[in-house]
Image (spheres, grey):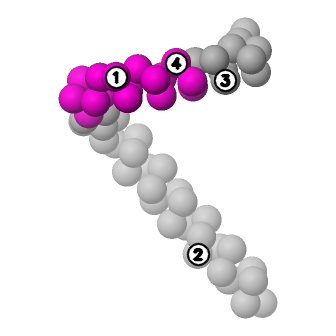
Amino acid sequence: MATEADRIAWRIHGREWRAANPERAKEISREWYHRNRAKVAEVRKMKREASRLVKVVANG
């Protein structure tokens, strides 16, 4: 299992790689989005529902 330090190191590495390879990073991002379109839509729907529920609770 990855430690927090490992996750931080990968985030830093990823940021540096994306800065050095912007075109390839965009391409990979687009490919990932198209492969996972259904998951992306589901997450967006869940976030909208959660936001709506928070507003309902906040307004009493």
| Label 4 SS | helix
Sequence-wise, the earlier of marks 3 and 2 is: 3
| Label 2 SS | helix
Q: From which residue to which does the magenta span run?
A: 11-27
Q: Which of the two discs, 4 and 2, sits closer to the camera? A: 4
The CA span between labels 4 and 3 is: 9 Å
Characterize the magenta stretch by its predominant secondary structure. Answer: helix
Q: In the picture shown, does residue 5 fall above or below 54?
A: above
In the image, which disc is placed on residue 20?
1
Is residue 31 among what the camera can see?
A: no
Q: Which residue is mark 3?
A: 8
Which quadrant: the N terminus? top right
Instruction: Write the residue at 59% across / 70% down.
Output: 51
Sequence-wise, the earlier of marks 1 and 3 is: 3
Sequence-wise, the earlier of marks 2 and 1 is: 1
Sequence-wise, the earlier of marks 1 and 4 is: 4
Q: Which residue is mark 4?
A: 13
Q: Badge 1: how crowded within 10 Å, few (<14), some, or many (20+)?
A: few
Residue at the limit of the structure toward the bottom, as seen here? 59
Q: Position of residue 18 (x, y in %)?
A: 38, 27
Q: Which residue is mark 2?
A: 52
